[in-house]
Amino acid sequence: MMELNYLGSVYPTRAVITTMKERRMGRIMFVSSQAGQIGLFGYTAYSPSKFALRGLAEALQMEIKPYNIYVTVAFPPDTDTPLLAEENKSKPLETKLISETSGVWQPDQVAKVLVKDVVQGNFNSSVGPDGYMLSALTCGMSPVTSITEGLQQIVTMGLFRTIALFYLGSFDSIVRRCMIQREQSKAADKRE
C-alpha cells in the first residue's frame, strides 16, 4: 500500500518538481481519501498510506510555495467506480456499514470539485458536507488558502467535533454489534 499510494505520488512529483521550480509555477495534486483523514475499521493498511500523503503535501507546500507552486491534497469520498464495486465484494461488514453513513458520489461530481480546487490553488479539497466537516476537523497545521477559510475552521470546530463524537460512537457501536453477531454465530455453529 505504501509503495502504491505514497511512493506512487512521491516519484512522479520528484520527476516534475525541478522543471516547475525553473518555470516558477505549477500545481501538484495528491489524491488521498476520506480514509486518509480518519482511520476506519478494515482500512489498517490503506488509511496510513493515505494519511502519509497529507504529511508529504504539507511539507512540500512549505518548500515550494516561494516558487509559486501550489499543492492540493484531495480527500474524495467513496466514488462510484469499478474499483469501489470490486472492493465492496470483500469489504468487512463493519466497513460496509460505516461507509454507508457517508454515501457514494458520482465520479463527475468528485472530479469537478477536485479540478476546481487545484485551479484555485486550494490546499485542501473535499467533497460534500461530510468531506467539509472532516477537512475542518483534521486541518491541524495545514496551510489555508484564505483568512476566511481559517476563520470558518475556527468557528465550526466545536460544532463539528460534537457531531464527530456521535459518528465515532455510532462506528464503535457498529463494530461491537458485528463482533457480537460473529461470536453468537460461532457459538451456534459449535452447538450444531
Image (tube, rainbow, N blue to C red):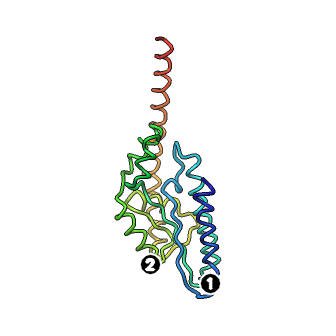
Label 2 – label 1 distance at C-alpha: 19 Å
Q: Residues within 10 Å of mark 1 (few under 14, many from 20)?
A: some
Is residue 101 found left or right of 73 in the rendered image?
Answer: left
N-term-proximal mark, 2 vs 1: 1
In what element is the residue under mark 1?
helix
Q: Residue at x 62, y 87 (%)?
A: 22
What amino acid is at disc 2? Gln
Q: Nearer the viewer, mark 2 or mark 1?
A: 1
In the image, residue 69 sits, relative to residue 80, either above or below, namely below
Q: Residue at x 53, y 56 (%)?
A: 36
Decide which of 107, 169 is in the foreground and name it. Answer: 107
Q: What is the x, y in percent for residue 96? A: 42, 42
* Residue denoted by label 1: 21
* Residue denoted by label 2: 120
Quarter of the rendering containing residue 25: bottom right
Decide which of 30, 102 is in the foreground and name it. Answer: 30
Q: What's the mark number on residue 58? A: none
Is residue 121 found left or right of 111 in the rendered image?
Answer: right
Q: What is the x, y in percent for residue 159? A: 43, 57
Q: What is the x, y in percent for residue 87? A: 46, 46
Q: What is the x, y in percent for residue 181? A: 45, 26
Residue situated furthest bottom in the rendering: 23
Q: Residue at x 40, y 62 (%)?
A: 127
Q: Residue at x 59, y 48 (%)?
A: 45
